[in-house]
Amino acid sequence: MIKRFVKWYVEFHCWLNIRQSKKSLLFAVLATLSVVATVMLSLPLKAQINLPQTPASELRGVWLTNIDSDVLFERDRLKGSLQRLDQLNFNTIYPAVWNWGYTLYPSKVAAKVIGRSLDPTPGLKGRDILKEIIDVGHQKGLKVIPWFEFGFMVPADSLLAKNRPQWLTSRSDGTRILKEGIDNRVWLNPFRPEAQQFIQDLIVEIVRNYNIDGIQFDDHFGLPSELGYDAYTVALYKKEHGGKAPSKNFQDSEWVSWRANKITEFMKRVFTAIKATKKDCLVSIAPNPQRFSYNLFLADWQKWERLGIIEDLVLQIYRDDLNVFISELEYPEVKAAKSHIPVSVGILAGLKNRSIPMQQIQTQVQKVRDRNFAGVSFFFYETLWNMSKEKPQERQKAFLKIFPTPTAYPNLLAGWKPFS
């Protein structure tokens, strides 16, 4: 801007030398400088220090789920929602494809193991939601990265839990059920070959049969650390430890490490299977910060990133306290990942009974941009503007201010090298 002004000023000065007296020239120059100074000082600080309003490329994502959300339950509603996201300059969607013990797409793998090929819930049964999302999403230029939301977790009363009880794991006292809110959950044993193969087969089925841009996992691809005391896992541990049983303290460092390493080995096999099926399918993970993921869910994403078996990290940092939010962005493992793969930040847009003010969302997005992350993604669609104390129109206008123009989706596979 200053260069343009100098060039214009020189041309203007020459013209004035011909047309005006010295007195007029002095007055014109002073007036011009006054106007320019006023304009420059009125610009936002970011413009003065030459920071772009938005990056040239940026991941702008949102998760779509069938929990506390209506977005997936009706074809026209889903189509309209994707169109609205495009209008507000989002470029990435993460639709759930494995929830409540069912697939949200017709699955031969699920039909064989569970007895149902598709979620039977009204509004979902009889539809291929993933295909609908891909067709509309790609037409609108949205990247579609299916989200394997439940991972190894299933409802306690699900057909899968009832049909395959031997696949379930337990606490040291033999109990299996964990509460998630008001819901009873159980977990498939991620160390048992049959359960591993089932999950891997579901993943490969999606990658093979759909024109997806990637696939995403989260902490549920691990296991709550209080679990893992089923007979199969204890016997496996004893076999590898000279007959010694695992510690009754589920946070024992060696017991945690052994289980986390087993899950890492499975993640390696899944990564290899995905790439063997479709080499340009992005392998993404959206975990909590490392300490939480590792200690509470045995999901060692820091190691996965170092091993090269994930290619994109969307770190869930759902914090109200801005200082805590910023501190999570600054941890060494986050900075290390940023130097290796694209790292984006998951921001909480709200929950069913918890409205997040738009000002907090805007501030957190700016803090992420200030640190040159690859982008942001919001949890979850319904709370962007439908579940909020603020009016939907106001929220949508605010998101348009965050994303004022379309921006290219980052080339997250740039420089990708096969795992070996």
Image: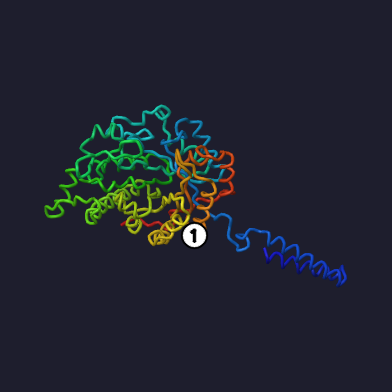
Is residue 283 something one can see in this rendering?
no
As displayed, is residue 269 above or below residue 136?
A: below
Indicate the position of residue 218 as horizontal and vertical percent values.
36, 47
Tell me: 251 left or right of 302.
Answer: left
| Quadrant in which the C terminus is drawn | bottom left
- In the image, what residue occupies the spot 46% across and 46% down? 348
Of residues 329 and 418, the one drawn nearer to the viewer in this rendering = 329
Give the colour scheme shown: rainbow
Of residues 6 and 66, the one drawn nearer to the viewer in this rendering = 66
The residue most toward the left is 243
Mark 1 is surrounded, within 10 Å at the Cα level, by few (under 14), some (14 to 19) or many (20 or more) other residues, namely few
Q: Name the residue under label 1.
A: 371
Indicate the position of residue 151 as horizontal and vertical percent values.
33, 42
- In the image, what residue occupies the spot 39% across and 43% down? 147
Tell me: 20 left or right of 193.
Answer: right
Is residue 69 something one can see in this rendering?
yes
Tell me: 252 left or right of 350.
Answer: left
- In the image, what residue occupies the spot 25% across and 47% down? 226
As displayed, is residue 295 above or below residue 68?
A: below
| Quadrant in which the N terminus is drawn | bottom right
Q: What element carries label 1?
A: loop
Indicate the position of residue 367 as horizontal and vertical percent values.
51, 56
Indicate the position of residue 251 as horizontal and vertical percent values.
25, 53
Of residues 232 and 10, the one drawn nearer to the viewer in this rendering = 232
The residue most toward the bottom is 22
Tell me: 210 left or right of 392.
Answer: left
Residue type at numbered disc 1: Arg
Count of residue discs: 1
